[in-house]
Amino acid sequence: MTSPTHSALAPTKLADWLSLLETRHSKEIDMGLERVMKVKNALDLQYSCPVIMVAGTNGKGSTCAMLESIFIQAGYRVGLYSKPHFLDFNERARVNGVPLDDESFVKAFDVVEAARKEISLTYFEFTTLAICKLLADAPLDVVILEVGLGGRLDAVNVIDADVSIVTSVDIDHVDYLGDTREKIGFEKAGIFRQGKVAICSDPQAPQSLIDHALAIGADLRLFGRDFNYNGDKQQWNFGGREQRRNSLAYPSLRGANQLLNASAVLAALEALRDQLPVGAQEVRTGLVMVDLPGRFQVLPGRPTVVLDVAHNPHAAATLSQNLDNMGFHAYTYAIFGSMLDKDILGVIAHMAGKIDHWCLCDLPLPRAASSDQLLNYLHDANVTEDKDHSLHQFKSPEDAYMFAMSKAGENDRIVVFGSFLTVAGVMRARRNAQS
């Protein structure tokens, strides 16, 4: 990437750039693509390799990680944009599984800064354009882009994808996307393109998503109609429109919905088989080797610690099911922090019967729910204290984690969930303890 002459006023360090971008725009989220599209055109941002875009209420990260892992095993050079990050911003952009360095980001930010002129961009819009430009200018064979919020008006959607995947559609971000699956399905279907493959792995795809795909002439492929899976305890099989893959290893990612995500991945591979052929062994190895922090991630050691970014009822229901499948634990401690705009009562409804000791924490964002508010939600859900159940409040996930670790016995477990920030706080506490 050719970097413009560095402005004397522009930051020279990544951390300073990010601090500037967090405060520059008047809104944290500013829906609409007009401003982003203008800067994209000024950047002459275009790709010379296939692009896969992934949206969905839950399952986006797992789907992207599986795609990345399989393509790497097949010997391709793979670019990935995912979000949000846990500990370091660099996690958001990877080439062949390796995060890009600070210098690359600073150069990309300089390029976007020169191109935007007087156009104001949010943190997400600015960084999305910078990362998309970084990946477009790299010598890559395939690029995977994860949508942030919704689809139709998300900044990533200024890119035209060759294959678009919607993993699941459920209620989340109601202030921006609507309060029904039909409204949200239409928003997510906004990433589909005329004449291009559009995949939906939700077993009950909203009619609005199907109708939009038909209206624009996308090549829609639905789970249960155009692709499917079956299997036993040892292995599973995939069937697509024209391609079958048998005797597959289960993904190393834990969880009840991972075969739905993996099926969408294999449907995408089928769609791109002429441009990016992938062999059976490469698929098997890619599924076994895939790694994704914070998605039903069970850490080694005792007490058992589970990290899961579940932050809406759909994800909480899956987490609850996964906890049931873990086997016996004497007591379960929860470290729970959430954004205020989430369906907190809906999340609690799925988790209340699984938790003995709640450790409620504040999070470092103005739009986060306070531990006082979380306590009120638990009271509203009739969660009470007795000799075997307790409710505690903390100023941070780190403090809550240290408390839970001091109380939990060897046969207990600690479940960290509710927000990326909750999981990130515990990851930070563990890293600090090990350093």
Image (cartoon, helix red, strand yellow):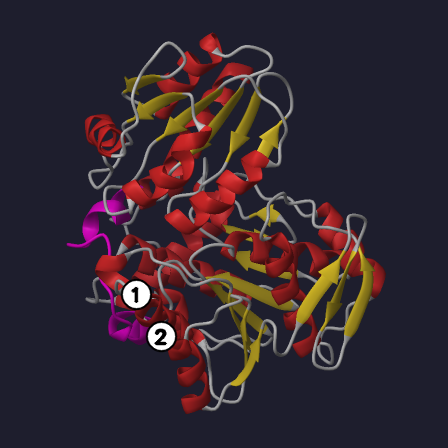
Q: Amino acid at mark 2?
A: Phe
Quarter of the C terminus within the rendering: top right
Q: Position of residue 323 (x, y in %)?
A: 55, 34
Q: Residue at x 40, y 83 (%)?
A: 212
Q: Main secondary structure of the magenta part?
A: helix
Q: Amino acid at mark 1?
A: Thr
Q: Position of residue 105 (x, y in %)?
A: 45, 51
What residue range appears in magenta? 19-41
Mark 2: few, some, or many residues within 10 Å (few <14, many ≥20)? many
Q: Position of residue 334 (x, y in %)?
A: 42, 26
For the residues labelled 1 and 2, say whether their Cβ atoms are less than 8 Å apart: no
Pick whichever of labels 1 and 2 is earlier in the sequence. Answer: 1
Which residue is the site of mark 1? 180
Which residue is the site of mark 2? 186
Q: Secondary structure at mark 1?
A: loop
**34 drawn magenta:** yes
